[in-house]
Image: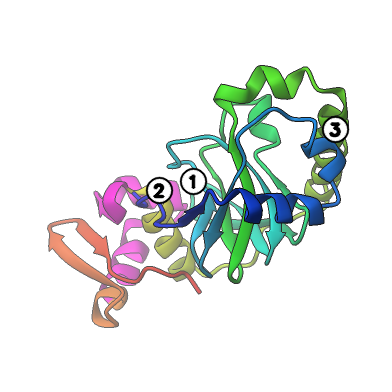
Amino acid sequence: MLEENFVERIYDKKKIASCIAKSRYHDVLNTLNVNFYLIKYQKGELVSSPFQNELLFQIVEQGSITIYFIRDDGTRYSLSNGTTDYFLGDMDLFYEKSNNIYAEAAESLTCISFPIEKNREILLSNNGFLRLICSSLSAKIGAMATIDAAPASLMDRVISYMKYKCAEETLKGIEQAAFHLHCSARQLQRILNQSETSGLVRKLGKGTYQLIQKEVE
């Protein structure tokens, strides 16, 4: 399982006010009685994931992100790319958090942030904020209607499956994993043997392999 990111949170009121003033949504943000703070992420860090303990609403202030969906068979779908003023957490206002959607910093990233749960009623009672959310969700739904799975080799899918779907990034049981990956146990074993030889995974025991590689190319 992926660990929670180590990120920098900034509570300096002057820096926060400066970022809000530059946001295209400053008029609405200034009507929200919430405690804003800034979060800085490094390239490759997860901005949002199923393993995130706290639900956050985040607005990209600087930098860019990549949003993708990981199916149970390790297939990766690119959902969207976001830059300045992109919303994260808008769907979490209304739906349970997806177990398959990830947002990753494509470069150094700064977000205007605040927790959703303790501010949910404030957010849902603000008409201006809700209009922004409706516009954001409509755009995302429209984009999702045109996506398709990125072509992936069985090697790519095995690595993604271990990284995103296996506890502690450890595959246990060849037959069960092969079923989820839609391949034969023999094919999976061959891929794991190749991955072990190339240093991507280590064998811990019979039918048990742990991922060494942390980034999926």
How crowded is the residue under tag 1: few (<14 C-alpha within 10 Å), some, or many (20+)?
some
Residue type indicated by callout 1: Asp
Percent across and percent down for residue 18 are 72, 56
**Mark 2 element type:** helix
Identified by mark 3, the residue type is: Cys
Callout 3 environment at 10 Å: few (<14), some (14 to 19), or many (20+)?
few
Q: Give the main secondary structure of the magenta stretch.
A: helix
Q: Secondary structure at mark 1?
A: loop
Mark 3 to mark 2 CA distance (whole Å): 31 Å
Residue at image position (43%, 70%) is: 215
The reply to whether the magenta stretch includes residue 180 is: yes
Choose mark 1 or mark 3, whichever is in front. 3
Q: Residue at x 13, y 57 (%)?
A: 206
Q: Which residue is mark 1?
A: 72
Residue 32 percent coordinates (x, y): 74, 30
190 vs 48, left or right, is left
Instruction: Tell me whether the residue at label 2 lies in contact with that at label 1, contact meaning CB atoms closer than 8 angstroms.
Output: yes
Badge 3 or badge 2: first in the primary sequence: 3
Query: Which residue range is magenta in the image?
Result: 167-193
Q: Looking at the image, do the residues carrying marks 1 and 3 touch, with CB atoms under 8 Å apart?
A: no
Residue indicated by mark 3: 134
Residue 24 drawn above or below residue 192: above
